[in-house]
Image (spheres, rainbow, N blue to C red):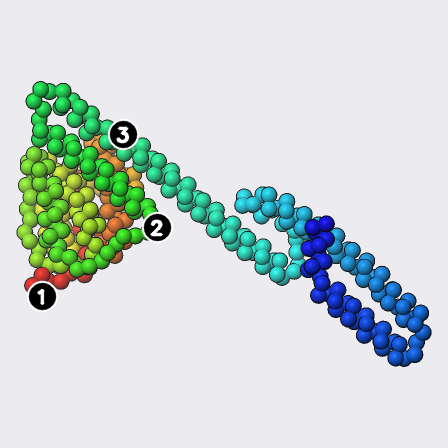
Amino acid sequence: MKILCSYIRQNLWTAGLFLLFGSIFSVMLLLKDLPVSDVLYALLLCAVFGLIAAAVDLWRYRKNILQLREAACRLPETLEGLPETYELRQQTYQEILQTLLDALRKARTEADSRQSDMLDYYALWAHQIKTPIAAMHLLLQDEQPDRGRLSDELFHIERYVEMVLQYLRMQSDSSDLVLAWCDLDAVIRQSVRKYAPLFIRSKVTLDYQPVRCRVLTDEKWLCFVLEQLLSNALKYAPQGTVRISLEAPAVLCIRDNGIGISGEDLPRVFEKGFTGYNGRSDKKSTGIGLYLCKRVMDRLGHGISIRSRPGQGAEVRLELDSVRSILE
């Protein structure tokens, strides 16, 4: 009954036109002085054929509705089962459905990939953060625990927590980037000050001369990148030297004289989860730090690259593009 009512409502205009044309046809025949019985007979024939055509069309309409309902039960997995149609409007609707289904599948794939990557990272992060926690438990068992080592382990925990927060922010579609002219020396000093205790306890020498310039960037995110690079330098250049300098026209260089990176690992250092030979031997690398640095620099419109040779240290180059002299 619901299908019949829908069909009638859809074809009211056609039925009205049919009655109008029948009325005009009858009036014209009567004006020609034809017998009323002949006019009624002609109208009856038209009505019979019209009802037969309507019945056939109603059957097709009902079949089409039932096929659409069956296909709806399979959505959004597939569009198989949709009725074949030669009507341009219905073909257009089906094309729209196919486009929406393709977009939904793509969104699902991306969401599944993000969830899988996030679960993998959380599993690695949880395993990684256990190390400083276990070390703190051991230190606290001493009657007079080494406060310096406790402070170092606490610093590592804070850094891991900060990194996972930055990882979540980078996975978000929204962005909190705020570009402004920043004093590059202030950004560098902020990062160095945070890692100063580790520089001292690791006996790493810092060679840094003020660069006296400003850069168009987001101070918070650029500071995050610098901190990750300093952390890597401290990890792989113990008792070595870290140099920070600015090369023309706008390249900030962070160099260390540590163990360096092998040639086969160098092209992949910015891949997510890639640790390389040194990272595997160190047992503490997650393969996330440089990946996040690359993502951040891309969002800021800056460039990042690494030069290195095994045993001769590494040089990370931040291409900041827009730089002004602080004296302007």
For label 2, count other residues whose C-alpha is less than 10 Å away and answer few (under 14), some (14-19) or many (20+): few
Q: Secondary structure at mark 3?
A: helix
Using residue 271 as the reference point, say whether residue 240 is left or right of it: left
**Percent of width and height locating residue 303:** 23, 54
Identify which amino acid the numbered label 1 is placed on: Glu
Q: Are marks 1 and 3 in contact (CB under 8 Å)?
A: no
Residue depicted at x 9% and y 24%:
145
Q: Secondary structure at mark 2?
A: loop
In this rendering, which labeled residue sits more in front, label 1 or label 2?
2
Q: Are marks 1 and 2 in contact (CB under 8 Å)?
A: no
**Percent of width and height locating residue 136:** 16, 26
Between 265 and 78, the one nearer to me in the picture? 78
CA distance separating discs 1 and 2: 37 Å
For label 3, count other residues whose C-alpha is less than 10 Å away and answer few (under 14), some (14-19) or many (20+): few
Name above or below for residue 143 compared with residue 90. above
Q: Earlier in the sequence, mark 1 or mark 3?
A: 3
**Percent of width and height locating residue 44:** 87, 64
Pointer 3: what residue? 127
CA distance separating discs 1 and 3: 49 Å
Using residue 121 as the reference point, say whether residue 282 is left or right of it: left
**Percent of width and height locating residue 273:** 29, 38
Q: Secondary structure at mark 1?
A: loop
Residue 305's label in the rendered image is none
Pointer 2: what residue? 173
Residue depicted at x 8% and y 26%:
146
Q: Earlier in the sequence, mark 3 or mark 2?
A: 3
